[in-house]
Image: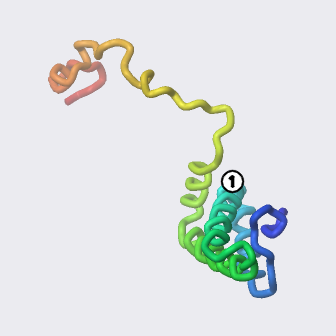
Amino acid sequence: MRRLETQSGFPGASSETAVVQDRWESLLGKTPRLRPWLSQMVERRRMVLAERLGRDAGAEIDRLLWSDLGRWLRDFEALPSYAVSAIALEIAPRRGLRRMPRASWKRSSPIPPSLSPTTASRPGCVPGWNL
């Protein structure tokens, strides 16, 4: 299992942050697809903090990052496990999938008269529907 501090952008671990780190590793062990998202969030947050506090405020940035990691962890742990898995699936990068262009969303042919809204509301117009 990879540790959080071995990934780029993660704050340095200490004895004070060991519990949060172990809990994150447990969560990431169950939902590994969260790991890339977490890495991106930490890197983005580090950049924002570095711009605000200055690049030489490394210890303060690490402290604030661990605070954020603890808050995010509590938020994820408060969710049911199926919700965390669903979130991980949603935010995971999709490889090999291409988005369908909006132009192809339009119907290539009109709705057949037998399925139009005006006729579909009449009983017996659609096979298998008993309205």
Give amino acid for label 1: Arg
Task: From the image, tell me which residue sits under label 1.
Answer: 33
Q: Residue at x 64, y 79 (%)?
A: 67
Residue 57 rendering spot, x and y as whole percentages: 72, 79
Residues 113 and 103: in front is: 103
Q: Does residue 21 sit above or below 44 in this rendering?
A: below
Quadrant where the N terminus sits is bottom right
Q: Does residue 104 sit above or below 7 in this rendering?
A: above
In the displayed structure image, the side of residue 64 where residue 18 appears, left or right: right
Q: Does residue 77 sit above or below 98 in this rendering?
A: below
Q: In the figure, residue 98 lies in which quadrant?
A: top right
Quadrant where the C terminus sits is top left
Q: Residue at x 68, y 53 (%)?
A: 33
Residue 97 rendering spot, x and y as whole percentages: 62, 32
Q: In the figure, residue 71 lies in which quadrant?
A: bottom right
In the displayed structure image, the side of residue 117 where residue 10 appears, left or right: right
Residues 31 and 3: in front is: 3
Residue 81 rendering spot, x and y as whole percentages: 59, 63
Residue 99 rendering spot, x and y as whole percentages: 54, 31
Q: Residue at x 57, y 58 (%)?
A: 82
